Image (cartoon, grey):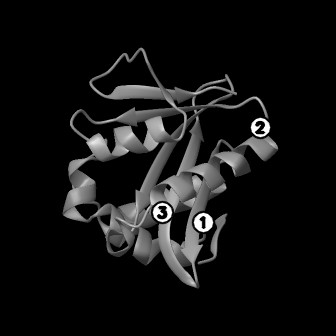
Amino acid sequence: MSLHLRLAQPADAADLLAWRNDPKTRALSRQPEEISWEDHCRWLDRMIADPGCLFLVAWLDGTRVGVVRFNRRGQADVWEVSITVAPVAQGRGLGRRILNEGVARLRRDHPGAEVLAAVRPGNLASERLFLGAGFRPTQSDEAFAHFVLGA
């Protein structure tokens, strides 16, 4: 199975919104409320245009299966990661592959980048994903647990 990542495009909007509004995904998100099509399209356009955002769509054998997004936090070379695997593609080990390929892509352009993950308490699948990918727990200034992958 051939997995590859490419930059997000407006044509990805419908799949991304469907995944984002999936009830299980929403329950584990920073912002658990449902997002409208109009708000989603405005947000996607901003993310695509933002030089402090690397937004990648994962494809497996010609089908979108997930996304990984990195947003720069402040002036430091710290990037917060967000990852979603399409509901129909979950449970196949794709999260780790998407995350690892996304981090590799980020570090090609930003070799010293640290990657920060914020995980909602009780989201054991995400904790296992990040710990298994080499992230380590770190101090958090919010209700979410934080994990960091050093440069």
Q: CA distance from mark 1 to mark 3?
A: 18 Å
Q: Which mark is residue 107?
A: none
Foreground: disc 1 or disc 3: 3
Quarter of the N terminus within the rendering: bottom right
Q: Is 113 left, or right, of 48 in this rendering?
A: right
Residue pointed to by mark 3: 94
Work out whether residue 50 or residue 76 is closer to the camera in this orientation and state it: 76
Marking on residue 8: 1
Answer left or right for 13 relative to 86.
Answer: right
Mark 2 surroundings within 10 Å by alpha-carbon count, few (fewer than 14), some (14 through 19), many (20 or more): some
- Say which of 88 and 74 sits in front: 88
Q: Position of residue 50 (x, y in %)?
A: 64, 49
Residue drawn where x is 47% and y is 47% of the image: 82
Q: Choose mark 3 or mark 2, whichever is in front.
A: 3
Residue 89 x, y percent position in the rendering: 39, 72
Residue depicted at 25% across the width and 54% down the height:
26
Checking the image for residue 110, the label placed there is 2
Amino acid type of the residue that numbered disc 3 sits on in the rendered structure = Leu
| Circle 1: residue type | Ala
- SS label for mark 1: loop
Mark 1 vs 2, N-terminal side: 1
Height in image: 122 above or below 45? above
Would you say the residues marked 1 and 2 are in contact, meaning their CB atoms lie under 8 Å apart?
Answer: no
Residue drawn at point x = 36 percent, y = 38 percent: 127
